[in-house]
Every structure is written in structure tokens, then in C-alpha cells.
Amino acid sequence: MNKLTSAKMGFFMLALVLFWLKSYIIYISEFNLGISNTMQHILLFINPLSSGLVMLGFALFFKGKRFGITLLIIDSLLTFFMYANIIFYRDYGNFITVQTLMQTDNAGTIGKSFLGLAEWHDLLYVLDLLVLAVLFVKRKADWSPARLNLKKPFAVLASGVIVFTVNLGLAEMDRPQLLERVFDNNYIVKYLGAPNFAVFNTMQTVKASAKRSLASSDDINEVENYTNKKYAEPNAEYFGKAEGKNIIKIHLESFQSFLIDYKLHGEEVTPFLNSLVHDKSKNFTYFDNFFHQTGQGKTADAEFLLDNSLYGLPQGAAFVTKGTNTYQALPAILDQKQDYTSAVFHGDDRSFWNRNQIYKYLGVDKFYDSSYYDMSEEKVINYGLKDKPFFKQSMPMLEELQKQDEPFYAHLLTLTHHYKFLLDEGDETIEPADTGDGTVDRYFQTARYLDESLEQFFQDLKEKGLYKDSVIMIYGDHYGISQNHNRAMREITGEKITPLKNANLQRVPFMIRVPGVESQGINHEFTGQVDVMPTLLHLLGINANDYIQFGTDIFSDEHEDFVPFRDGDFMTKEYSYVKGTFYDNKTGEVIEEPTEEMKELKNQVHYELSLNDEVLNGDLLRFYEPYEDWEPVDPSDYQYGKNFEENEDKQEDANADKEKLENEDGNQEKVEEQQEEGQEKAENKQEDKS
């Protein structure tokens, strides 16, 4: 060791090998990359080498001890980068991208969960840095103050490029068009490594920015042709049945469908939601094969899908990175077509997920954020206002909307059933599970709390006369339990969590009640969040075919019975495509020889996602006019926040007072004129008498 580290190249080689081994250990122990064959395992092992050679190799250009200092700094930055991805992956099941780094408003809230995500063994990931630092202190005096012959550092960098080229070639053999069909970040990291993924993602971000500047009106034609072809005609039995009705949309945070009818310790976890599913007198239709289709944006992606019938992005959240795009969203359509007032209710800061900006581009009239709620310490936990006080405090605002002449579209987002699934003492009404995994064990307690808050909310809606004639829609936004908890979920479900089982667990609830329309009970149609907007438009009697939408009406006989996921996987009634493999849904077995129909559907899903990305990256809806009288949303027409609203009310009061005074002044002038006329007449009469 002494002989090795007494030379700069020896010290560099030691740092390279330690970084290489550390990266490989992180890949196999921290990330669920879906290694399915020997080639993929070989690629996973060699891919840290190229980034190590290139990035650490830059230190070789420095003289004397500055070489060692630079090497330690670069190695420390790489370690920080890898560890940041570890923490992010534990919470989000994905990797950090340029887009997520742009989501600075989320950093403070996400940071609250850092300690809960850190593990004691994480200290091992800095052990190599400590070893190198000690050796640097001992050996820096042995190094020549001169710079290495430039041939050596350039040879190291060239070696890194060669290794990367070989790596990419082997990766393309195992997964053709790896860099052209990027729907899942796991693939890039698995084949090329996390640092190379970061470089690739940065290039993609720059490319996407360039696409917008180069896009033209011709680019929307291909998208329009595809969505027109996919369009499903409305079911005449349902078309227009909800016209003029209030719409109350309830967002169930992190709620997966396996909770429905699930019993823990002999108790139903969600008895109220279960009653909506099974009691036909409550008139809800429940879709038990409804899937979330979110990506990195999770909650924000769910909102985006439901109000635009567009998918999110493969990296980052469209709410943030495409927050100033042109949209033809549900709130704006309902306003222009049927004079609806739209409102979002959320017990959190209005800037989270960039809501205070993108809502303006969606045409949301009112945004009741945390400034409208009593956020006392006892009413807040984890990410914001608890669900029970949230629903209670939202009622007066809903009543205000009800007083207006036009119908309203209200979207209420719950928060308590969110990772880390925390409750205050006294709010727990069911014992936790006993898997030994705290996240999974607490998940059932916050689900029960959410269920109880919904029951209370429904009672309040009925008491205030808001329930009977309102469309009530309930949906889950995304998974709550990630693949990092597969061991505990195996205990909960009684099944091994295979890739297919995990895909099946991406079901989230979707149920809807339309006044005057008989419940279908449990509907088994395969559907997803992208289908909600066209369904709702048709229920309201608005033709969805006027708009660019990738979903289709769930109630239509022509609804396409397949569900694409953001990573390019998809599910149908008979078979599924998950992580590059086709499965038979009934047997769970791998389909070794997929049919042409299966291959064609896979290509269609990838094509649909690529068109979606073209729409978002090129901001193509700015070139599309749904119909002749359509008015593009003007974001300057919208302002949010209680302070703004109070100032607006004061201004209205001031204007009213001014008008009153002006009226009073005008009346006073008339009185004075009449008095003068009367005086003049009296004087004239007196003259006549004289």
C-alpha cells in the first residue's frame, strides 16, 4: 500500500478502484434496477469505470499536492451525488434529474423526511474517502511537485471514453435504441451508471428546450391525427347526464386499491370507502382495474393527468418544468363551455409543486391554499393540514361557491395519508400492522384516518345541501408503498412481490357518483388517470374530440381496454408488459413468444408516450385551436392567496363607497338645483303680484 500510494498514478488507481467498487455495491444494494440476465449484471459492474476514469482523471492535470486535493474534492462530489440519489430513490423510487433539481420549492418539505430515510450503514459510503484522506496526508510529501506528462492524463480520459463506448455498444445489444426510447430512468442507470445518466439527462433537458424554440404549427398535426383515431364515441346513456351539476373531486393521497376490503387484525381498514363500493344505494360506480400513471411528479402528475388527459414527463414534473406551457385544461373548458367556477383546496403552501403558477395556465379560478386554513400546530402533521380539519374548514368555502349563480368544479387534495404516514396520539383508531417495517405498518393507520375524514365530509355535504345534486368523484393519486418495502408487502399480501405483482399493486381507487344515473356497482374495465377528463367531459355533454387528449371515455363502448404507464410498461385484461417482459395475467407466467398483437400494442404505447412528450417539450398546444370561439387562457387573469383576495375585496368596497359618495354628491346637486329653481319661481310669482 505504501509503495502504491507514494506515486500519483498509484494514488489515483486506488481512488478509482474504491469508487468503482462503492458504486457497484450501491447499485446492487440500494436501487431496484431489475437485473434479469448475465449481460445486464456485467454491464452494471463495468459502467462505474468509465465515469470514474473521466471524472477522477481530471485531477491528473494538477501539480503536486493540488492533484490530491482536487482528486478528493471530485471524489467527494461524486459520493455526495450518489448518496443524494440513494436518499431520493428511497423516497421516490427514482433518480435525481435536472427537472427535480429545478423543483426548489419542494426541497424544504422533502428535506423533513431525510432523517427517516437515512440508514446507519450509509456511513460505509464515505469510508473510502476517509482512507484516501489519511493516505493523502501521509503521502503528499512523496509526490513530485511537477505535473505529470500530459500523455498520461489524456490516456486516462481516452480510456474512459473507450470503456463508455464499449459499455454503450453492449447495452444496445441487450436493449436496442436505449437512448432513443427513454421511458424509464432505471434502464439508463442499469446500463450506463448514475453519473452518465446525469450527463444524459442534462443533454436531454437542453434538447427539450431547443425543441420548443424550433417547434411549429405543423408539429401538432401528427398528434391530432393520432388522438382523433383513438377517440371513443360517448355512450348515449351517459352523455350530458351531469350537465350543470356541481363537481366535487376528492384526491386520496398515496392510496392504493389493495386497501379496499382489506382487514387488519380482523378489522376493515376503510369501512366507509368499502360501503361506497358495495352499497348500491349510495350510487357509486367503482373501477377496480383503475391504475395511476404518474412518473417522478407523483401527486403533481396525477393532477396533470386528470385535468389535461396528458401524461407527465419521463423526468421531473410537468407542473414545474412545463409550468408556463399553453394548456386546454378541464377548468378552462368548463368555464368557457358551461360557466363553471373552478377551485382547488389544499392545506399546504401554494408554491409547492409550482401550483401557484401552473394553476393560472390551467385556468383555475380560485386556489384555497394554507393561507385560508387554521394551520395551528395541533391541526398540522407531516406535509400539512390534517384531513379532518381540512375537510371541516373547507365547507364554508364550498358554501360560498354554492351561493354563486354558476356551478362549480371543486378539487380537494388530502395530505395525512402521505409518507412517512404519521399520526398524532389520539388520531389512531386501528393498531398498526406488525411487519417490522414502520412505513408499511403505519400505512394502515393513516388510511383509516383518511377514511374517517371522508365519512365526516360526506355527512357535512349532506347537511349543507351540497351532496344530492353534485357529481362526487374520488381517486387515488399514486402508490404509497414503494418497491423498497417488498419484504413487508409480501407479508401483507401473502404473495411474492414479482415485477407483475408490483405492477398490479399500482391500482388506485376511482369511483364516481352522478345524480340521476344508476350505479354500475363494480366495473372491471381496465383504465387509468388519463381517461378521467374525456369521461367527465362527456358526462357534462361536452364533446371531448375537440381537444388533444390521450385518454378515452371510460363509459364508452369504444374505450380502449389498456393502460400505459409512464415508463412504457402497460397492462391489459389478458396480458401485461412489465420491465421488458410480457406476462400472462391469469397464470403470472412469462410469455416467451409474444404475438404480433402484443408487439404492436407495445409499439403503440411507446408511440403515444413519444407524441405526448412532443406536445409538452414543444409546447404544441399553443398552435392548436379546439374550436372557433376558443379563448386561450391568459394567466394574468388569475391571482391566488388570501392576502390578495382580501386586498381585492377592500378595493371593491372602496370602489362601492366611492360610487355611493358620487351618487350622494349627484343627488345633492339635484336637490340644490331644485331649490334654486323653486326659489326662482317664487321670486317670479312675487314680481307678478307686484
Image: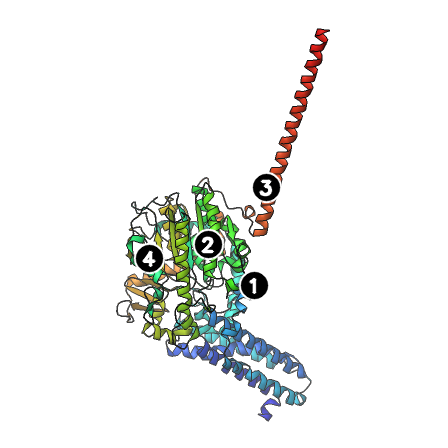
In this rendering, does residue 312 appear at all?
Answer: no
Position of residue 441 measured from the top left corner of the image (x, y, whole percent): 40, 73
N-term mark: 4 or 1: 1
Q: Which secondary structure, mark 2? A: helix
C-alpha distance separating marks 4 and 1: 39 Å
Q: Nearer the viewer, residue 631 or 663?
A: 663
| Residue kind at label 4, given as amino acid type | Leu
**In the rendered image, which residue does mark 2 sit on?**
615
Q: Residue 666's quadrant in the figure?
A: top right
Q: Three-letter amino acid code at disc 3?
A: Glu
Q: Is residue 7 left or right of residue 258?
A: right
Where disc 3 sits, the SS reads helix
How far is mark 2 from mark 4, CA to CA?
37 Å
Amino acid under label 1? Thr
Rendering coords of residue 396 (x, y %) = 48, 50
Q: Which of the two labelled residues, at mark 3 and mark 4, occupies the earlier sequence position?
A: 4
Mark 1 → mark 3, Cα distance in angstroms: 36 Å
* Marking on residue 276: 4
The tag earlier along the polypeptide, 1 or 2, is 1
The label nearer to you, 4 versus 1, is 4
- Position of residue 220 measured from the top left corner of the image (x, y, whole percent): 45, 50
Q: CA distance from mark 3 to mark 2?
A: 40 Å
Q: Badge 2: few (under 14), some or many (20 or more) residues near its Cα, within 10 Å? A: many
Q: Quickly name the residue at label 1.
A: 104
Residue identifier under label 3:
652
Q: Quadrant of the C terminus?
A: top right
